[in-house]
Image: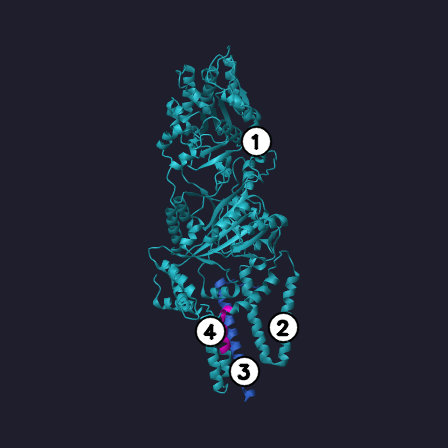
Chain colours: A cyan, B blue
Amino acid sequence: MMPSPRSIFLARLWAFLNYRTRLGLSWLELLTASGVGLLLVWAALHGWESLPIVGPLALYLLCAGFYALLRVPLGWMRALHDWICKPLSIKPEPWRKYLAFTILGIALLADLFLVTLDRRVAALFSLMLLAIVILMWAMHDRATMGGALNLTTVASRIPIQKILSNGLIVQRDGTQSRIAIITLGRSGYKPALKPVDVADILTKFLASLAQREEGELPIRIFWLSDYHLGQFDFSNNGHGNEEYVRELRALVESGARRARIVMTGIVYPIQIEDQVREWLTQLDFDLAPLGAFAVESLLRMLFGNESFLGQIQETTLKAAGGLPRVAYRGYMPEEIEFGEQVQTDRNGLSVLRINTPFHEARDALMRALRSVDGMLTITLHPLPRDASATQMRGRLLAARVPGLGNAREAQSLRSTLEKLEDRRGLEYLFEAQTHFVTSGHDVAEAQRNQNLAAAYLTALDIKPVTHRALDSLENWLPVLSVPRATSLFTRVVDWLALPPPPPSQRLLTSEAISVLEREEGSDVYLADARGRILLGRSVDPNKEGLRYADFRSDTGPVLLVSDQGGGKTSTLIVWFILRLKLLNYKIVAVNLKYSTRMQVAVERAGGIVLHPTDDLFDFEKRVHDGLFSDRAILYQPVRGTRPFAIADDPCLRVFMKTFYEAWLPHRDAPAALVIDEIHRLMPKDNPLSANASEVATLVAETFKDWAERKLVIAAATQTLRDLLGSNLGVALQKFRTVAYFQVGPEDREMLIEKGYEPTLIDMIIGARRRPRGFCVLIMPDGFYTTMKVLVTPEEKEIIQRLDVEETSDVTPQLAFR
Amino acid sequence: MMTRIHLTRAQRDLIAVAALVVILVLVFLLLGSLLGDRVVQIR
């Protein structure tokens, strides 16, 4: 709908009148003051005859003209109301009710006293009293949501009415919004977006937020720092294998002590869920909406200082891979107190308001967040384009008045206006509020975090939010209220009764897009929640922290490729044998070399190790029993005991045959087939024996059956080229997923053929000898990073001890030499 | 038996604004009358 010329004129006039001139008064105040002065002069010239009309009129005009100053007495009333009804330290205090009655009683007594002096003055006083009572009732009505809230309970201060079982948050005003973690979905298979494309996509998205017909909607983006493993404190209450829990705990202690990660999240009203999802996909991000349990965990983290990821991880481990759909744990703290900081019984939160425009403050804020426990939130509220441009025109006019306006401001307003009114530019104005929250479970820690953050923020204009201002949790918590169109009277009463909105910055679209244009995506997937498992820690700059391998029960065969010392076997052990066992996978491992590292790992995991023997019948029986048990099972050749090359051993054939023919059709649990040195099934130089050929066929058939059987298969080999040239290659080409670990320069051609980006290829094969344990990992979704494979000290020792043996390990090892 | 009347927020606010307006008018009149007395005194 096009606004009428009259409404445009009035909007501009109003903006002009509200411009604060260099005299310190706005135009409205200046004009009112002079008008009232003239009125009084006129009355005086007429012998004050008209004073009964002119006097009150002058007073009312002054009140109207200086309406902004009315906030001061209204603020006093609100302070009185809050002091009586809304204590900063929340505990039941019945005496406050009596206090209110006492104050009212004193006022009535004063009124009675006035009656004895002058009845009209007393009446005036009573009317004032009545007005104050009405205003305070309106304030109370707003604060208690129409009497629904008991302000002396903690629940009334937390701006969440309830969390629905699908994770939607219902605010007090009925608005429904959702929290989602933004995860990196960047693909290695297609070229990365150029900055200009990112800016373009974000511009369109932000414009679409402002252009909605039902009214513009805000979004809130937050970055939250958490520790992944440092607080990995799961109590072992009889669930799962104690040994594994111990194993994982040891892993935690050695590998990733207090690895800080930063998650990126977004809060949006449900109306725009599809829009947000579509836009993020274009930016190569994914959206992981939080369910009820996760939302509650997030709030427990903020109010209770329990690691968000820790809670999820712990619950997943206890519940064998899933999160409860509904959580009745309660996210409310027992006590809450608003002073210099929000102090709950278990956590203290200090809140800073950042007044520097976000695009200038971003770097400092992000650096600060990476070094402290805390959260950074920014709320973007788009303003309608036409209305904000009209308003700005009015301000510009006032700013250009010589002597009273500000020439520099006029210049900046003019340049903003030019961008705003360029129809092709998609520029909008956004109201942005930025808050930086630091936390600590005790005073010392909170202070340390705060000081550390302050050290990064010295160049910014910051203001600590304390006491009463802190009581508005909805300004920085990951919740979002969408103001709805209300009646004129409600808006009048809102203006009188609600506290003035906190100061905000006005950003143009081009400035607001800095919120996400450089976002790398969240460092974590909510992995365990969806059956993914922890592989290692990313060491790439800006990707520090831990990564989850997107490895699910239906991922498909995974092939690990690297040269010697690349960490294939370590990964197989850590990743598949230990971690998957933890997730109750059935592990079937085949080791095609004499190194006993896998044996050690399987034995540690309480598994069965089968060595080839001469008695094939007995061996088959043991394989059968082992496969149908719950324990991990490993085929492990022993040097010097068999007159065959490893692949030619009939025991291997029996093992695979039993696996494929007897066990596989009856499999009922998630399982992993782990084969180390799979290329030995296909020797390059000598012809394939009948035995090895049969084993290779069984493995290839298992791969083919993948889709139906949902079996996880891992294979490791020397070089990719050897493998692709072998008869296994046919089956391997069907791999949906291949993770490459540090391959050699000779594989460059093949990587180019497969369509990887040049930068990624350089990363994979650039360093021929990377330090042991580091590798480039490409995930099934195309995500890639340099990883440090996490191992326990014991695993490390085993790996080191067996190094020599490993390198001297040659395929045809015949006994009776 | 007393029945509680439930008003919507808009209705409550309408009543509040109406009451405030009435108060403002009354204050206007009272102030005027008080000032009128002052005028008489000045003369």
Q: Name the one closer to the observer, A596 or A205.
A: A596
| Residue type highlighted by circle 2 | Leu
Residue named by callout 1:
A792
Residue A176's x, y, as percent?
A: 47, 52
Taking the image as drawn, is residue A668 in sight?
no
Q: Are the residues under marks 1 and 3 on the same chain?
A: no
Taking the image as drawn, is residue A427 in sight?
yes
N-terminal of the two: label 2 or label 1? 2
How far apart, in angstroms, are the residues tagged by discs 2 and 3? 24 Å
Look at the image and give the residue range highlighted in magenta: A58-68
* Number of the front mark, 4 or 2: 4
Residue A400's x, y, as percent?
A: 40, 68
Chain of the residue on which disc 1 is drawn: A
For mark 2, give the secondary structure: helix
- The local crowd at label 3, few if under 14, some if 14 to 19, many if 20 or more residues have their Cα within 10 Å, is many
Residue named by callout 4:
A30
| Residue type highlighted by circle 3 | Leu
* Number of the front mark, 3 or 4: 4
N-terminal of the two: label 4 or label 2? 4
| Residue type highlighted by circle 4 | Leu
Q: Residue furthest bottom?
A: B43
Task: Name the disc covering residue B35, or none.
Answer: 3
| Residue type highlighted by circle 1 | Thr
Query: Which quadrant does the N terminus of chain A fall into?
Result: bottom left
For mark 3, give the secondary structure: helix
Chain of the residue on which disc 4 is drawn: A
Residue named by callout 2:
A108
Task: Name the disc covering residue A347, or none.
Answer: none
